[in-house]
Image (cartoon, rainbow, N blue to C red):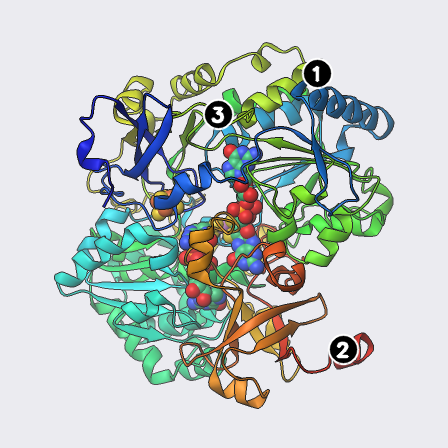
């Protein structure tokens, strides 16, 4: 319980309402107590009136003040003096940093053209302004290369869209009304904590909860049943469930008839998927698949929560597309408490033009590079650069090497830590180490990425700037007010880009707008009916506003899917056009063809971190201990590995040292490395992204973080020579 929560009436304390900026579906509203005498934030807690937050933050953001006031916070601009990666910097003034960066960028643009500049960002903050707000204006005006932001959700998002039309789904609150809940490839208690109270409410009314996951996560342990599925085989499981549902006539014929297309083709398709076939693929027995299918079809309302875990595979898009057919087949969408949620972000039908100003491109169409191919994008080999071009569908192909465009000569990183989070870390570090690459990093801390920068610019945290946060797990838009003054000389991303724009002579009036004006104008420019309830005044007054949607919100109870056919598309013309099988199918994971002796490596979130954010907060790092790998006793025994031993985890991409946790809470053949550790806080300065690959998933150019095969061996054993490893591959 918060120290100050109940002393809010103290005369010297001001309470400021804000919104958590982190990449998490819960998008909590918070309250911050600020001591007016010192201007210091002294406490933070969950907003008691926010219908999802309900007064509670997670264990990470409960410690947000320790991050904000961390002694390592960057408070002045820094210029590199040692070799790249060495972390040797000296302080400089803002004037000096901005002038030199602008001069270098102008020089690079003059010689190689604006596409030689690459922005690199993701969701360090989910705020619309400090996220891409001013940054997009800046890079659009420049004509820089564009970045496809695919690192997290691209594959599943696209698969969901093909089937249902948009990333819209059940609202969190309605999970409380479900009688059956499938937590499918999601570690709710870690990554979507605020859904749990609704699940518990449903359980009190008799609901059963089933976790489908190769790892017995804390969520799977808290569920009524754990279904250990082999990684990358969920599509096969869903097809077999549909086989049973159709064969036994358990589908909702009326819903199917009125609100879906392609049922006859689907029936034909799933005929080929008896549970026995899926058993051989998924490792889940045919009997259990039958039971699961019957229960899912007959216990209504039935809710499915999928998250992005299960789509980080070669067939991840198709897996989500296939699972997304289930609720329509059994008519689950009809009921409050029935349906599916992947994301709610599609309901926020923003017109982003007033914010991002695509008109500043002035008709130019710069190339788009895929962020998960950063290693290739930073290569001086034109063939690799060509591979980094964004090609999300089978019908797209990369340009020939001589048309790949200029090499990337400047990289501007904000809201992301690619040296630690991007796949194929060796290639990324090799690129970042290039002496001819000019790198600028906007950051709170001296991260692994910042170590490779020419300039590191200190950015403000959510306590220090304005923003508007669009959630992806519920339907409440959140405003963030600054609670304290910026620490030291830190500036909001918006102001940093404003200053860089001025120094580059970008004199368009949009580069003079202040943060509050930008946000207010953006909110007021929205015309979509969901924003009828959302006014700037209400945001200021309440801090969060629900979209204008019915209560309860049953998005597809009456069909109205935002697909080309207005129906749930069991058969999808768009997929056929884009080069896919138009019907649900199973696309095997790349790792299915893994060599003998390898294990499947999943590196999903550690409980106390948020991606690499919070790893440097001592109290949270102590909770995680050290970088570990969970391994089944059978697999450990076969490799002579004992609990607590240091092991080397490696494959053709790279290698990493981790501590073995020998446990039965994982399917045999699978290992789990809770992530994402900072490289420099890991043994030998490398993390698990040493073993992940730049290859794309089937849809959206998404990443394959969990479609990975590794060898695991005691670290004390003499290291295998590179040549022998190559031979083993
Ligand atoms: N505490 C915390 N919360 C977070 C994050 C964090 O780092 N820490 N990250 C945030 C972000 S960026 C995101 S995208 C979301 C992610 O949210 P989730 O998708 O819920 O998170 P993950 O833990 O990545 O994946 C969920 C589960 O998928 C399982 N899984 C992996 N492969 C498969 C498979 O093939 N099939 C099935 N059925 N399961 C599989 C993993 O074992 C894992 O338990 O969480 C957000 N919330
Ligand atoms: N092996 C493996 N790799 C993964 C994943 C995995 O599960 N396994 N998960 C993937 C997923 S789902 C995601 S979403 C990505 C996440 O990748 P990133 O989005 O890069 O996430 P973080 O590692 O949290 O890094 C965000 C950085 O932004 C900084 N930051 C935060 N707010 C601000 C701000 O206002 N201004 C500036 N300038 N900086 C700010 C933080 O200090 C932090 O260093 O990682 C991916 N990588
Ligand atoms: S990280 Fe997620 S659960 Fe934690 S406070 Fe932020 S939005 Fe809430
Ligand atoms: Mo993510």
435, above or below 640, in the image: above
* Residue at the spot 43% in from the left edge and 17% down from the top edge: 516
Q: Image point 21% across, 36% down: which residue?
A: 5
Nearest to viewer (mark 1 / mark 3) = 3
**Real-space Cα distance between discs 1 and 3?**
22 Å
Closer to viewer: mark 3 or mark 2: 3
Of 72 and 310, the residue lying toward us: 72
Which residue is label 1 attached to? 503
Q: Position of residue 616 (x, y in %)?
A: 52, 49
State yes or no: discs 3 and 2 in contact (Cβ < 8 Å).
no
Q: Earlier in the sequence, mark 1 or mark 3?
A: 3
Label 2 sits on residue: 725
**Horizontal side of residue 477 vs 587, given as left or right:** left
Element assignment for label 2: helix
Please tell me in which quadrant of the rendered image residue 225 appears: bottom left
Q: Where residue 563 appears, x then y in whole percent?
A: 43, 44
Q: Is residue 50 above or below residue 141?
A: below
Q: Which residue is mark 3?
A: 486
């Amino acid at each position: 319980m918060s120290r100050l929560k109940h002393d809010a009436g103290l005369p010297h304390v001001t309470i400021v309402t804000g919104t958590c900026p982190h990449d998490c579906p819960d998008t909590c509203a918070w309250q911050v107590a600020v001591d007016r005498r010192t201007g210091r934030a002294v406490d933070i807690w969950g907003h008691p009136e926010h219908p999802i937050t309900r007064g509670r933050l997670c264990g990470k953001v409960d410690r947000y003040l320790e991050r904000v006031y961390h002694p390592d916070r960057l408070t002045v601009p820094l210029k590199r003096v040692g070799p790249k990666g060495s972390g040797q910097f000296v302080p400089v003034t803002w004037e000096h940093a901005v002038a030199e960066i602008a001069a270098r960028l102008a020089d690079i643009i003059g010689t190689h053209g604006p596409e030689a500049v690459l922005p690199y960002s993701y969701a360090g903050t989910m705020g619309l302004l400090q996220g891409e707000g001013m940054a997009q204006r800046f890079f659009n005006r420049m004509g820089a290369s564009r970045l496809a932001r695919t690192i997290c959700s691209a594959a599943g998002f696209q698969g969901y869209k093909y089937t249902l039309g948009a990333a819209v789904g059940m609202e969190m609150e309605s999970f409380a009304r479900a009688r059956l809940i499938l937590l499918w490839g999601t570690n709710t208690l870690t990554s979507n904590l605020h859904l749990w109270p609704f699940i518990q409410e449903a359980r009190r009314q008799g609901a059963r909860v089933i976790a489908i996951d190769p790892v017995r996560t804390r969520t799977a342990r808290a569920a009524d049943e754990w279904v250990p599925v082999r990684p990358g085989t969920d599509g096969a499981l869903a097809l077999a469930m549909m086989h049973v549902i159709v064969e036994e006539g358990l589908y909702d014929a009326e819903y199917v008839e009125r609100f879906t297309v392609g049922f006859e083709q689907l029936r034909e398709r799933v005929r080929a998927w008896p549970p026995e076939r899926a058993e051989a693929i998924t490792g889940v027995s045919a009997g259990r698949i039958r039971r699961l299918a019957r229960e899912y079809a007959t216990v209504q309302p039935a809710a499915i929560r999928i998250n992005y875990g299960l789509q980080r595979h070669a067939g991840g898009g198709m897996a989500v597309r296939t699972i997304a057919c289930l609720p329509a087949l059994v008519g689950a969408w009809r009921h409050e408490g029935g349906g599916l949620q992947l994301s709610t972000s599609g309901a926020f039908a923003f017109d982003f033009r007033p914010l991002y100003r695509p008109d500043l491109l002035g008709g130019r169409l710069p190339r788009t590079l895929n962020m998960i191919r950063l290693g290739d994008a930073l290569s001086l080999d034109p063939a690799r650069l060509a591979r980094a071009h964004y090609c999300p569908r089978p019908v797209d192909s990369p340009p020939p090497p001589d048309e790949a465009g200029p090499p990337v000569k400047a990289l501007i990183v904000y809201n992301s830590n690619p040296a630690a989070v991007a796949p194929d870390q060796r290639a990324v570090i090799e690129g970042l180490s290039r002496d001819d690459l000019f790198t600028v990093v906007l950051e709170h801390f001296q991260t692994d990425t910042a170590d490779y920068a020419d300039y590191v610019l200190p950015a403000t945290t959510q306590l220090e700037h304005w923003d508007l946060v669009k959630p992806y797990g519920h339907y409440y838009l959140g405003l963030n007010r600054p609670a304290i003054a910026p620490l030291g000389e830190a500036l909001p991303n918006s102001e940093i880009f404003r200053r860089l724009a001025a120094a580059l002579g970008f004199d368009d009036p949009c580069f003079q707008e202040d943060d509050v004006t930008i946000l207010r104008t953006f909110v007021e420019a929205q015309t979509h009916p969901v924003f009828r309830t959302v006014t700037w005044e209400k945001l200021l007054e309440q801090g969060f506003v629900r979209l204008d949607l019915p209560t309860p919100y049953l998005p597809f109870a009456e069909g109205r899917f935002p697909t080309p056919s207005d129906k749930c598309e069991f058969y999808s013309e768009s997929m056929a056009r884009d080069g896919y099988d138009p019907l649900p199918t199973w696309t095997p994971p790349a790792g299915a063809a893994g060599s003998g002796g390898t294990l499947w490596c999943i590196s999903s979130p550690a409980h106390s971190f948020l991606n690499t954010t919070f790893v440097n907060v001592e109290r949270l790092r102590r909770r995680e201990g050290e970088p570990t790998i969970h391994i089944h006793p059978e697999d450990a025994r076969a490799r002579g590995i004992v609990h607590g031993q240091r092991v080397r985890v490696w494959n053709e991409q790279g290698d990493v040292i981790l501590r073995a946790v020998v446990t039965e809470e994982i399917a045999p053949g699978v290992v789990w490395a809770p992530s994402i550790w900072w490289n420099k806080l890991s043994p030998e300065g490398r993390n698990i992204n040493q073993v992940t690959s730049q290859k794309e998933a089937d849809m959206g150019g998404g990443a394959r973080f969990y479609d990975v095969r590794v060898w695991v061996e005691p670290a004390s054993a003499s290291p295998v020579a590179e040549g022998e490893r190559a031979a083993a591959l």
